[in-house]
Protein backbone atom coordinates (compact mmCIF):
# COMPACT_ATOMS: atom_id res chain seq x y z
CA UNK A 1 0.00 0.00 0.00
CA UNK A 2 1.09 3.54 -0.64
CA UNK A 3 1.29 6.12 2.08
CA UNK A 4 2.49 9.70 2.44
CA UNK A 5 3.32 11.12 5.84
CA UNK A 6 3.74 14.77 6.64
CA UNK A 7 4.48 14.75 10.34
CA UNK A 8 4.48 18.52 10.78
CA UNK A 9 0.95 19.85 11.12
CA UNK A 10 1.90 23.50 11.41
CA UNK A 11 5.06 25.56 11.15
CA UNK A 12 5.15 29.21 12.18
CA UNK A 13 8.03 31.44 11.15
CA UNK A 14 8.86 35.09 10.95
CA UNK A 15 9.36 36.57 7.52
CA UNK A 16 12.79 35.90 5.98
CA UNK A 17 13.32 32.72 7.95
CA UNK A 18 13.77 29.47 6.04
CA UNK A 19 11.10 26.77 6.25
CA UNK A 20 11.67 23.07 5.59
CA UNK A 21 8.70 20.77 5.13
CA UNK A 22 9.17 17.06 5.63
CA UNK A 23 7.59 14.33 3.54
CA UNK A 24 8.10 10.60 3.93
CA UNK A 25 6.47 8.15 1.56
CA UNK A 26 5.94 4.43 1.35
CA UNK A 27 5.64 2.38 -1.79
CA UNK A 28 6.91 -0.96 -3.02
CA UNK A 29 7.24 0.35 -6.55
CA UNK A 30 10.58 1.33 -8.00
CA UNK A 31 8.96 3.76 -10.43
CA UNK A 32 6.75 6.52 -9.10
CA UNK A 33 6.30 10.27 -9.00
CA UNK A 34 6.37 12.73 -6.15
CA UNK A 35 4.69 16.10 -6.06
CA UNK A 36 4.44 19.18 -3.91
CA UNK A 37 1.33 21.36 -4.03
CA UNK A 38 0.53 24.62 -2.32
CA UNK A 39 -2.99 25.44 -1.17
CA UNK A 40 -3.39 29.13 -0.31
CA UNK A 41 -6.38 30.38 1.72
CA UNK A 42 -8.33 30.83 -1.52
CA UNK A 43 -8.45 27.01 -1.76
CA UNK A 44 -7.00 26.08 -5.12
CA UNK A 45 -4.17 23.57 -5.49
CA UNK A 46 -1.07 25.15 -6.96
CA UNK A 47 1.42 22.75 -8.53
CA UNK A 48 5.00 23.33 -7.36
CA UNK A 49 7.06 20.38 -8.49
CA UNK A 50 6.93 16.83 -9.90
CA UNK A 51 9.85 14.45 -9.59
CA UNK A 52 10.15 10.91 -10.87
CA UNK A 53 11.81 8.21 -8.83
CA UNK A 54 14.82 8.04 -11.12
CA UNK A 55 15.63 11.70 -10.73
CA UNK A 56 17.29 12.23 -7.39
CA UNK A 57 18.95 15.41 -8.48
CA UNK A 58 18.05 18.12 -6.05
CA UNK A 59 17.09 21.43 -7.45
CA UNK A 60 16.69 25.05 -6.56
CA UNK A 61 14.08 27.19 -8.24
CA UNK A 62 14.06 30.72 -6.96
CA UNK A 63 13.29 30.54 -3.24
CA UNK A 64 12.20 26.90 -3.43
CA UNK A 65 14.42 23.86 -3.20
CA UNK A 66 13.82 20.14 -2.95
CA UNK A 67 15.75 17.32 -1.36
CA UNK A 68 14.78 13.89 -2.70
CA UNK A 69 16.45 10.95 -0.98
CA UNK A 70 15.29 7.58 -2.19
CA UNK A 71 17.33 5.75 0.45
CA UNK A 72 15.22 7.28 3.22
CA UNK A 73 12.01 7.65 1.16
CA UNK A 74 11.96 11.35 1.82
CA UNK A 75 11.07 14.28 -0.39
CA UNK A 76 11.57 17.44 1.62
CA UNK A 77 10.81 20.97 0.49
CA UNK A 78 12.43 24.20 1.61
CA UNK A 79 11.31 27.79 1.24
CA UNK A 80 14.22 30.16 1.63
CA UNK A 81 13.69 33.66 2.99
CA UNK A 82 9.99 33.13 3.57
CA UNK A 83 7.43 35.81 2.75
CA UNK A 84 3.92 36.40 4.03
CA UNK A 85 2.55 35.21 0.66
CA UNK A 86 4.05 31.79 1.38
CA UNK A 87 1.43 31.27 4.09
CA UNK A 88 -0.55 28.26 2.91
CA UNK A 89 -1.03 24.54 3.38
CA UNK A 90 1.58 22.49 1.56
CA UNK A 91 0.80 18.97 0.42
CA UNK A 92 3.17 16.24 -0.62
CA UNK A 93 1.72 13.59 -2.95
CA UNK A 94 2.74 10.24 -4.44
CA UNK A 95 1.53 9.01 -7.83
CA UNK A 96 2.24 6.83 -10.82
CA UNK A 97 2.45 3.55 -8.95
CA UNK A 98 1.65 0.19 -10.44
CA UNK A 99 -2.07 -0.58 -10.88
CA UNK A 100 -2.93 2.89 -9.69
CA UNK A 101 -1.16 4.98 -12.23
CA UNK A 102 -3.26 8.10 -12.25
CA UNK A 103 -4.18 8.31 -8.60
CA UNK A 104 -2.40 10.77 -6.36
CA UNK A 105 -2.03 9.86 -2.70
CA UNK A 106 -1.77 13.02 -0.63
CA UNK A 107 -0.24 13.59 2.76
CA UNK A 108 -2.17 15.36 5.47
CA UNK A 109 -0.56 18.69 4.67
CA UNK A 110 1.54 21.17 6.63
CA UNK A 111 0.16 24.59 7.44
CA UNK A 112 2.85 27.26 7.05
CA UNK A 113 2.22 30.57 8.78
CA UNK A 114 4.60 33.40 7.96
CA UNK A 115 4.27 36.51 10.09
CA UNK A 116 5.77 39.89 9.26
CA UNK B 1 -1.40 28.20 -20.14
CA UNK B 2 -4.19 25.61 -20.48
CA UNK B 3 -6.49 25.28 -17.50
CA UNK B 4 -8.99 22.86 -16.04
CA UNK B 5 -12.18 24.81 -15.48
CA UNK B 6 -14.70 23.94 -12.78
CA UNK B 7 -18.17 25.36 -12.33
CA UNK B 8 -19.70 26.55 -10.12
CA UNK B 9 -17.05 27.75 -7.70
CA UNK B 10 -19.48 27.43 -4.80
CA UNK B 11 -22.75 25.52 -4.61
CA UNK B 12 -25.19 25.32 -1.75
CA UNK B 13 -27.75 22.55 -1.79
CA UNK B 14 -30.32 21.06 0.55
CA UNK B 15 -29.77 17.63 2.01
CA UNK B 16 -31.28 14.96 -0.20
CA UNK B 17 -30.98 16.97 -3.39
CA UNK B 18 -28.99 15.88 -6.42
CA UNK B 19 -26.02 17.97 -7.48
CA UNK B 20 -23.89 17.93 -10.59
CA UNK B 21 -20.42 19.38 -10.47
CA UNK B 22 -18.96 20.31 -13.82
CA UNK B 23 -15.45 20.31 -15.15
CA UNK B 24 -13.88 21.12 -18.49
CA UNK B 25 -10.52 19.31 -18.70
CA UNK B 26 -7.63 20.44 -20.86
CA UNK B 27 -8.50 19.62 -24.43
CA UNK B 28 -5.74 17.13 -25.28
CA UNK B 29 -5.88 15.32 -21.96
CA UNK B 30 -7.23 11.77 -21.90
CA UNK B 31 -7.39 10.91 -18.19
CA UNK B 32 -9.80 12.55 -15.80
CA UNK B 33 -10.14 12.53 -12.04
CA UNK B 34 -12.22 13.76 -9.13
CA UNK B 35 -10.87 14.42 -5.65
CA UNK B 36 -12.54 15.55 -2.46
CA UNK B 37 -11.24 17.63 0.43
CA UNK B 38 -13.33 17.93 3.55
CA UNK B 39 -12.56 21.22 5.30
CA UNK B 40 -9.27 21.08 7.13
CA UNK B 41 -8.44 17.60 5.91
CA UNK B 42 -6.30 16.08 3.21
CA UNK B 43 -7.16 15.75 -0.45
CA UNK B 44 -8.67 12.33 -1.17
CA UNK B 45 -8.96 10.51 -4.46
CA UNK B 46 -12.49 9.66 -5.57
CA UNK B 47 -12.33 8.30 -9.11
CA UNK B 48 -10.34 8.14 -12.32
CA UNK B 49 -11.89 7.95 -15.77
CA UNK B 50 -10.49 6.99 -19.13
CA UNK B 51 -12.02 6.04 -22.45
CA UNK B 52 -15.52 6.57 -21.07
CA UNK B 53 -15.01 4.15 -18.25
CA UNK B 54 -14.09 4.32 -14.61
CA UNK B 55 -10.49 3.14 -14.25
CA UNK B 56 -10.31 3.19 -10.49
CA UNK B 57 -12.49 4.34 -7.62
CA UNK B 58 -11.99 4.70 -3.92
CA UNK B 59 -14.18 3.35 -1.15
CA UNK B 60 -15.63 6.86 -0.79
CA UNK B 61 -17.08 6.62 -4.29
CA UNK B 62 -20.18 4.65 -3.45
CA UNK B 63 -23.45 4.21 -5.32
CA UNK B 64 -24.56 7.77 -4.71
CA UNK B 65 -21.71 9.05 -6.88
CA UNK B 66 -21.43 8.81 -10.64
CA UNK B 67 -19.25 10.35 -13.31
CA UNK B 68 -19.90 11.05 -16.93
CA UNK B 69 -18.33 12.62 -19.95
CA UNK B 70 -21.54 13.64 -21.71
CA UNK B 71 -19.81 15.30 -24.63
CA UNK B 72 -16.31 15.90 -25.90
CA UNK B 73 -15.47 18.60 -23.40
CA UNK B 74 -17.29 18.22 -20.08
CA UNK B 75 -16.59 15.82 -17.24
CA UNK B 76 -19.21 15.71 -14.50
CA UNK B 77 -19.57 14.35 -10.99
CA UNK B 78 -23.09 13.65 -9.82
CA UNK B 79 -24.09 13.13 -6.23
CA UNK B 80 -27.56 11.61 -6.21
CA UNK B 81 -28.86 12.40 -2.74
CA UNK B 82 -26.57 14.70 -0.86
CA UNK B 83 -25.78 14.29 2.81
CA UNK B 84 -24.35 16.80 5.24
CA UNK B 85 -21.04 14.94 5.16
CA UNK B 86 -20.74 15.52 1.42
CA UNK B 87 -19.90 19.14 2.19
CA UNK B 88 -16.37 19.54 0.88
CA UNK B 89 -14.21 21.03 -1.82
CA UNK B 90 -14.31 18.91 -4.96
CA UNK B 91 -11.38 19.09 -7.36
CA UNK B 92 -11.36 17.91 -10.93
CA UNK B 93 -8.05 17.04 -12.59
CA UNK B 94 -6.87 15.81 -15.95
CA UNK B 95 -3.63 14.44 -17.32
CA UNK B 96 -2.09 13.67 -20.66
CA UNK B 97 -0.91 10.20 -19.79
CA UNK B 98 -1.78 7.52 -17.31
CA UNK B 99 1.41 8.14 -15.38
CA UNK B 100 0.38 11.59 -14.14
CA UNK B 101 2.34 13.54 -16.75
CA UNK B 102 0.80 16.97 -17.12
CA UNK B 103 -1.48 16.44 -14.13
CA UNK B 104 -3.51 19.63 -13.73
CA UNK B 105 -6.12 20.47 -11.10
CA UNK B 106 -9.06 22.78 -11.47
CA UNK B 107 -9.68 25.49 -8.90
CA UNK B 108 -12.35 23.44 -7.17
CA UNK B 109 -16.05 23.61 -6.35
CA UNK B 110 -16.98 24.19 -2.74
CA UNK B 111 -20.13 22.20 -2.01
CA UNK B 112 -22.14 23.09 1.05
CA UNK B 113 -25.01 20.80 2.03
CA UNK B 114 -27.51 22.35 4.44
Image: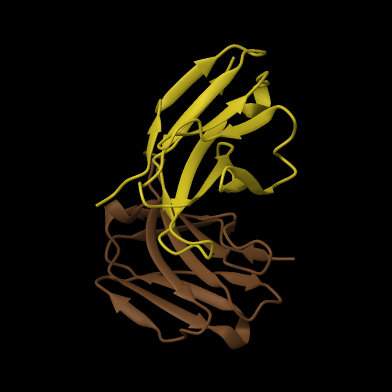
Q: Is residue A50 above or below residue B78?
A: below
| Residue B106 visible at all | yes
| Quarter of the figure with residue A8 | bottom right
User: Is A81 or B65 nearer to us in this picture?
Assistant: B65
Q: Residue at horizontal 63%, vertical 28%? A: B86
Give the number of marks. Answer: 0
Residue A3, position as x, y percentages in the image: 68, 64
Does A60 sit left or right of B53 as displayed? Answer: left
User: Is B78 or A84 nearer to us in this picture?
Assistant: B78
Residue B3, position as x, y percentages in the image: 32, 46
> On the rendered image, what quadrant is the N terminus of chain A found in?
bottom right
Which chain appears yellow? B
Does B22 sit left or right of A73 as displayed? Answer: left
Q: Residue at horizontal 49%, vertical 80%? A: A68
Q: Is residue A103 above or below residue A81?
A: above
Applied colour scheme: by chain
Q: Residue at horizontal 51%, vertical 84%? A: A54
| Quarter of the figure with residue A36 | bottom left
Which chain appears brown? A
Q: Is residue A90 above or below residue A68?
A: above
Q: Is residue A87 above or below residue B9?
A: below
Residue A25, position as x, y percentages in the image: 63, 71
User: Is A98 or A108 nearer to us in this picture?
Assistant: A98
User: Is A74 or A99 nearer to us in this picture?
Assistant: A99
| Residue B46 visible at all | no
Amino acid sequence: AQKVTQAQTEISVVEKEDVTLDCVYETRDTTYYLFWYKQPPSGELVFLIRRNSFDEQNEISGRYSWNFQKSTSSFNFTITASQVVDSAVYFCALGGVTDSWGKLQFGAGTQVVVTP
Amino acid sequence: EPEVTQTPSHQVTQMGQEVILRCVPISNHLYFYWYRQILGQKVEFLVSFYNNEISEKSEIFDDQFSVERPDGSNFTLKIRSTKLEDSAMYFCASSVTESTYGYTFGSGTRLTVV
